[in-house]
């Protein structure tokens, strides 16, 4: 019932929700009758920004529909949409707040919003919107009302809650009347005793220890009214823990429920090892996906006591320069019609608006257990509350969990466990508030240039060693500059010279041939190698290391070794002649095409391990279930490779192809060393590849012409990159 479930709603439910609703929120009918009821003054116009959490790229179409609908409703408004990835979102938002770049409207769960509320970063929407209590369910609004702080700091966006689920087959075979299911903890423990007795200890009804949410569910206060200290070490809490302690001692719960081996209540229920669990309104259809037989045996019942509430909402920045548009946008996303359409498309997600209570889709069941569960969950929202206070962080939750486990196992008394938990949590709370005050003053004192100071070293490096050289190269390309300075503008003379440069033509042809051979080899061979070393075979770790070793070797050292092996008197020619395979040495380093072949072989040998690692990472993300399903359907190894593996790593293959293409066109070190700096066949640098010719022309006194060659190589490299990037976009859209 803690943070994990709360954030799971954020990342999981919205994912399903947004893909299902498409552009519903921005739809004409839904929006036209959903004018904001805000009392804020000022015309809704200008630019306004909204930030969402991990919606791109999968839900881009949805958000664009929302924005289009809002801009159509308010023609004078332009909406800028920002989206942040799931990981590190809380830190990102705090960073934006500290640098003064917080968007006008921000998707924040209640615990993410709290630090900014304490620093006056979020708007108290109750001061601007007089119809909040009329339009939204109480629990949704209370989630954004914090102890010790007056106001409401977010619009509830969508809600979730839990109800009870029962395995009727298990209950019936153990003598439990499924028409009279447990309605509280006492009757649950009583039924668990019956199940143990009837099954001889083989079946369990209960399989989880309590948490802070269970205390709140029984009406036990967790925090003082001012929110400054924890107070859940009450006689009622002691009695509750004692009930669980006795149940565990009597063998009514699995022994590993207190250990790291505990799989979780939901997983044990899905495995039919326990007969009771809790879950959202869409739990039965979810069970049906993995265990259809069990799903047919499951029935719901109302949650014990006060139902838990899981909330996602939209907060408005108090620093917004366009408050009327910001409030209108937040209201647009959370209005009754749009929320209802949103929830109808997404099972298990419910609207936070009071107007939705009249909608039969939510209030009337279709007669199935799944339909009953949906209605029970929806009705629970009328009184559901955020049971675990948002100030309970992971450190507090872990300590509480440890103390409760000690009490239930009998190692300490329930009173001592609760007293220790409250003491520790109050220490953490006080330390956290002091740190928050310090960080808050820092937030207030930071200036706009603070982030720039942090990135200044990297920016200076980028300008000095990347941007300025690139700009200077463009300028030099139109001069006859020399390495040691001087020179004058010559217009397009350097580019005209390229048309008559036969050495350039040779170098360009060699570079293209080099690329055309290396790209397919280094795209396919590492994939096949990754498939081989992915298998769990004896000694496979050794081969993984052996294949990767050339990657970490110096390119100069490797080229010198290959040069020694391929020389006319080198190892390969000497051994081949001694065995009678060759009558004379092969000119690996003096024949134009053999030299290219040798360089290609070196590049492939050295690069196999690098791209193998990239493919291994991609193969790990291909669901094994797809391979298993294909095998069940009779697909052989080749068919599974073509139908499952290749589609699964297609994006990675495109990435690898781009990397190899760029590297192949920029080959320099290997060929330069292998030709002993002479430039290869005939001693002409231009007969090798573009970069060697570029290097030779530049250091032989014609820096302007070398700069022009650099621009030519840039555009040659850019063409395949753009083509591959376009192909990648088409694949992503497909």
Image: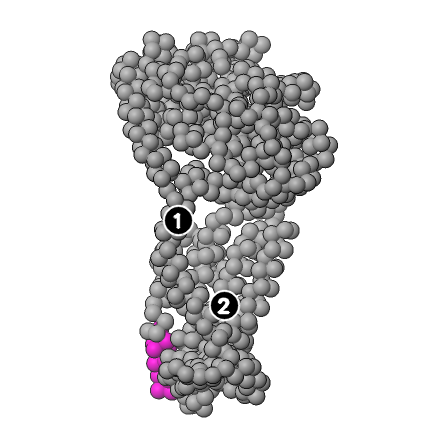
Q: Is residue 292 magenta?
A: no
Which residue, given by chain and number where applicable, does mark 2 sit on?
Answer: 662
- Which quarter shows the N terminus? top left
Which residue, given by chain and number where applicable, does mark 1 sit on?
Answer: 449
Identify the residue shown where x is 47% and y is 31%.
122
How far across and how far down the image is residue 413, in percent?
27, 14
Q: Could you say which is closer to the camera, residue 244 or residue 404?
A: 404
- Please tell me the numbered disc located at residue 12: none
Q: Is residue 568 magenta?
A: yes
Task: Indicate left or right for 725 with 451 as reference.
Answer: right
How far across and how far down the image is residue 246, in percent?
35, 12
Q: Could you say which is closer to the camera, residue 611 or residue 342?
A: 342
Q: Is residue 491 visible?
A: yes
Q: Could you say which is closer to the camera, residue 324 or residue 210?
A: 324
Q: Are marks 2 and 1 in contact (CB under 8 Å)?
A: no
Residue stretch in magenta: 558-572
Describe the element under mark 1 as helix, strand or loop: loop
Residue 67, compared with residue 705, is above or below; it is: above
Residue 508, compared with residue 298, is above or below; it is: below
């Amino acid at each position: 019932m803690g943070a994990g479930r709360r954030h799971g709603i954020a990342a999981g439910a919205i994912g399903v929700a947004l893909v299902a609703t498409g552009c519903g929120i921005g739809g004409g009918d839904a929006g036209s009758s959903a004018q904001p009821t805000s009392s804020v003054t000022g015309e809704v116009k200008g630019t306004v920004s909204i930030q969402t959490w991990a919606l791109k790229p999968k839900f881009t179409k949805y958000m664009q529909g929302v924005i289009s609908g809002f801009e159509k409703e308010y023609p004078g408004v332009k909406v800028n949409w920002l989206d942040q990835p799931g990981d590190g979102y809380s830190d990102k938002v705090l960073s934006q707040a500290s640098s003064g770049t917080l968007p006008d409207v921000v998707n924040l769960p209640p615990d993410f919003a709290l630090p900014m509320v304490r620093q006056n970063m979020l708007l108290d929407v109750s001061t601007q919107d007089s119809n909040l209590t009329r339009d939204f369910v109480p629990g949704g609004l209370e989630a954004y009302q914090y102890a010790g702080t007056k106001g409401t700091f977010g619009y509830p966006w969508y809600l979730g809650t839990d109800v009870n689920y029962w395995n009727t087959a298990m209950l019936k075979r153990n003598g439990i009347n499924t028409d009279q299911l447990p309605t509280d903890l006492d009757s649950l423990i009583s039924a668990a005793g019956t199940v143990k007795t009837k099954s001889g200890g083989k079946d369990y009804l209960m399989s989880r220890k309590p948490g802070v949410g269970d205390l709140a569910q029984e009406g036990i206060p967790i925090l003082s009214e001012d929110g400054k200290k924890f107070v859940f070490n009450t006689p009622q809490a002691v009695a509750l823990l004692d009930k669980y302690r006795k149940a565990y001692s009597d063998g009514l719960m699995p022994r590993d429920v207190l250990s790291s081996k505990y799989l979780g209540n939901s997983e044990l229920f899905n495995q039919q090892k326990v007969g009771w669990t809790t879950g959202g309104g869409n739990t039965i259809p979810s069970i049906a996906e993995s265990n259809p037989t069990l799903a047919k045996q499951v029935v719901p019942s109302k949650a014990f006591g006060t139902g838990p509430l899981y909330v996602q909402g939209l907060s408005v920045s108090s620093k917004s320069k366009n408050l009327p548009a910001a409030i209108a946008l937040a209201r647009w996303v959370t209005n009754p019609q749009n929320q209802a359409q949103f929830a109808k498309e997404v099972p298990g997600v419910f609207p936070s608006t009071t107007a939705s209570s009249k909608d039969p889709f939510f209030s009337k069941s279709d007669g199935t257990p799944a339909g009953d569960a949906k209605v029970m969950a929806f009705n629970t929202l009328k009184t559901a509350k955020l049971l675990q206070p948002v100030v309970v962080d992971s450190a507090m939750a872990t300590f509480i969990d440890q103390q409760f486990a000690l009490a239930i196992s009998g190692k300490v008394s329930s009173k001592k466990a609760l007293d220790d938990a409250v003491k520790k949590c109050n220490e953490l709370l006080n330390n956290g508030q002091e740190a928050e005050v310090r960080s808050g003053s820092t937030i207030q004192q930071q200036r706009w240039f603070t982030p720039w100071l942090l990135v200044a070293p990297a920016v200076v490096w980028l300008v000095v060693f990347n941007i300025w050289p690139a700009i200077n190269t463009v300028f030099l390309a139109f001069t006859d500059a020399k390495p040691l300075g001087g020179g004058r503008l010559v217009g397009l003379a350097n580019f005209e010279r390229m048309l008559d440069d036969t050495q350039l033509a040779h170098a360009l042809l060699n570079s293209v041939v080099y690329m055309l051979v290396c790209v397919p080899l280094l795209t396919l061979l590492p994939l096949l190698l990754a498939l081989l070393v992915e298998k769990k075979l004896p000694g496979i770790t050794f081969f993984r290391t052996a294949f990767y070793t050339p990657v970490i070797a110096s390119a100069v050292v490797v080229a010198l070794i290959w040069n020694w092996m391929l020389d006319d008197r080198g190892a390969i020619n000497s051994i081949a002649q001694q065995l009678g395979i060759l009558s004379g040495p092969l000119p690996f380093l003096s024949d134009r095409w053999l030299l290219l072949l040798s360089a290609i072989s070196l590049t492939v040998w050295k690069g196999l391990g690098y791209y193998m690692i990239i493919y291994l990472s991609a193969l790990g993300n291909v669901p094994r279930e797809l391979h298993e399903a294909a095998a069940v359907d009779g697909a052989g190894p080749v068919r599974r490779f073509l139908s499952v593996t290749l589609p699964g790593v297609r994006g990675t293959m495109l990435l690898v192809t781009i990397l190899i293409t760029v590297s192949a066109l920029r080959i320099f070190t290997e060929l330069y060393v292998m030709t002993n700096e002479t430039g290869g066949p005939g001693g002409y640098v231009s007969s090798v590849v573009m970069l060697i010719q570029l290097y030779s022309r530049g250091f032989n006194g014609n820096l302007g012409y070398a700069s022009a060659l650099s621009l030519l190589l840039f555009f040659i490299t850019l063409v395949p990159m753009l083509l591959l990037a376009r192909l990648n976009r088409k694949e992503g859209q497909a």
